[in-house]
């Protein structure tokens, strides 16, 4: 399959979710084989061992058993092909340190073994050691092992290191060898996006999507590109397309929900969030962010629906203390915006008992007291929040509003002047001038 209408000179950035396909252990060459000198030889007996391993894998034999069998057959003078096979098995079972040791053993026996070095680079990347991975890949290039998969892996390594320009060069070279490699297009798109070349990114992603419309990460990256170009409605269109094609990940759906809320469409957002969190154990942190979004626009139906999901999850999975505290806070906020004042105050008091320095809770309590015209209690809550420093400016502005309601204009001016001294803001300056007029 070919990617149509994408000139090599104008390709862009894409974020690959999870582990890119090219990070998996390389078993064969699929038509782009290296010279014979880069491949180890095996004896008849060793070939039989490898055949037995292959047959065991096809019969779904337990990997640990296969690993133990293979380890018992490896000697100091056996073919590096056996060490390589052991590395692949350990890689497959997630034993990265053992895989690394096996690949290094293969390379010690045969430094020119290209596949072992490429897989060693993959293992190092998964262990977060991008510098070591880069060193191994550069060694491959110096040996003349220029394969498309190697160049794609090199580009990915540079991206991890935060170097999009050499990443771009690597991906372009990979595409010269293999112009239909979607992973290389993804990486190239990402490297350009990180260089803020958004229009190029969007054009490439649009063209690649024509060939791979069911690759959800393409749509997500296209949405990110359009957001960078300040085109939120086009970003929504991209994610909605992925949704209709059933290609959108839960994260992409949650992002679509966020965007719909930002565009004043909470009802549509509720439907999308329902899809995003439909799995039995959705991301609790993402769910809590959705609740925050509904709280921000004071959409009580959305808050209630999402909090109901969170409470169900709370009974099924082990949450962190911070997550539980966040749900408690959101429940208190829900009660407040629904006018359940006593319930909200009780919840806030419980939160303060757990964390007496929680400025958000103090400000929220001050807001309730202010709405209930209990101005002295409101001022006490705001003053206490202001003393903690974190939200001092916000506390000063809210104290000023209380003083204006009480007719203490001079005191309000003092609070606003202090807030402006700490951080000048146009809307505060405007409010300060209005209060000064009242004094005159």
Image (spheres, helix red, strand yellow):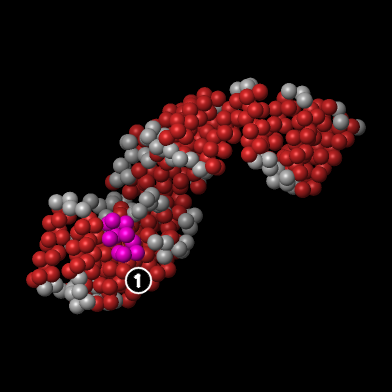
- Is the residue 98 above or below the residue 406 in the image? below
Q: Which secondary structure lies at badge 1?
A: helix
The spot of residue 296 in percent (x, y) is: 59, 33
- Circle 1 residue: 136
Q: Extreme right residue here?
A: 440
Q: Residues within 10 Å of mark 1 (few under 14, many from 20)?
A: many
Residue 383's quadrant in the figure? Answer: top right
In the depicted structure, whether residue 426 falls above or below residue 31? above
Relative side of 10 to 227, left or right: left
Left or right of 423: which side holds 282? Answer: left
Residue lying farthest left? 44
Residue range of the region highlighted in magenta in the rendering:
90-99
Q: What residue lies at 37% left-to-right and 39% top-to-bottom?
A: 248
Q: Nearer the viewer, residue 281 or 427?
A: 281
Q: Does residue 129 appear anywhere in the picture? A: yes
**Between 218 and 411, the one nearer to me in the picture:** 411
Magenta-colored stretch includes residue 98: yes
Specify whether 289 is left or right of 109.
Answer: right
* Quadrant housing residue 125: bottom left
In the image, residue 412 lies at what x, y percent?
83, 35
Q: Is residue 396 magenta?
A: no
Quadrant in the picture for residue 54: bottom left
Query: Looking at the image, can residue 167 be seen?
Result: no
Task: Name the residue at 66% across, 37% down.
Answer: 353
Residue at 44% x, 57% y is 192
């Amino acid at each position: 399959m070919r990617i149509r209408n994408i000139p090599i000179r104008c390709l862009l950035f894409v974020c690959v979710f999870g582990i890119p396909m090219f990070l998996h252990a390389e078993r064969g060459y699929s038509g782009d084989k290296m010279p014979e000198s880069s491949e180890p030889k095996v004896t008849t007996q060793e070939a039989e061992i490898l055949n037995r391993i292959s047959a065991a894998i096809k019969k779904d034999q337990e990997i640990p058993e296969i690993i133990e069998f293979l380890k018992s057959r490896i000697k100091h003078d056996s073919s590096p092909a056996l060490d390589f096979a052991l590395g692949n098995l350990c890689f497959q079972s997630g034993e990265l340190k053992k895989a690394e040791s096996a690949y290094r053993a293969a390379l010690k026996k045969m430094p020119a073994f290209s596949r072992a070095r490429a897989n060693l680079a993959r293992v190092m990347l998964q262990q977060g050691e991008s510098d070591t991975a880069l060193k191994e890949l550069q060694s491959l290039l110096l040996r003349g092992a220029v394969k498309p998969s190697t160049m794609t892996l090199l580009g990915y390594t540079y991206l991890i290191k935060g170097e999009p320009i050499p990443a771009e060069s690597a991906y372009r070279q990979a595409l010269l060898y293999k112009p239909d490699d979607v992973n290389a297009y993804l990486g190239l798109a990402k490297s350009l996006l990180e260089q803020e070349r958004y229009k190029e990114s969007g054009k490439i992603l649009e063209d690649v999507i024509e060939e791979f419309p069911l690759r959800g990460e393409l749509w997500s990256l296209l949405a990110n590109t359009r957001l960078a170009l300040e085109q939120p409605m086009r970003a929504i269109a991209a994610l909605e397309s992925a949704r209709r094609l059933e290609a959108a990940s839960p994260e992409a759906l949650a992002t679509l929900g966020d965007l719909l809320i930002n565009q004043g469409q909470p009802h549509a957002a509720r439907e999308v969030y329902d899809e995003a969190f439909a799995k039995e154990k959705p991301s609790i942190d993402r769910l809590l962010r959705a609740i925050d979004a509904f709280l921000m626009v004071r959409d009580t139906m959305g808050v209630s629906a999402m909090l109901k999901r969170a409470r169900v999850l709370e009974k099924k999975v082990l949450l962190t203390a911070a997550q539980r505290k966040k749900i408690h806070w959101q429940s208190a906020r829900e009660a407040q915006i629904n006018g359940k004042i006593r319930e909200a105050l009780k919840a806030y008091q419980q939160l303060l008992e757990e964390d007496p320095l929680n400025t958000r809770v103090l400000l929220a309590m001050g807001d309730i007291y202010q709405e209930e015209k209990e101005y002295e209690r409101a001022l006490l809550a705001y003053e206490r929040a202001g003393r903690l420093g974190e939200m001092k400016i916000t506390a000063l502005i809210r104290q000023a509003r209380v003083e204006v309601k009480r007719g203490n204009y001079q005191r309000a001016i003092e609070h606003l002047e202090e807030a402006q001294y700490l951080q000048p803001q146009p809307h505060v300056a405007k409010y300060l001038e209005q209060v000064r007029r009242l004094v005159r």
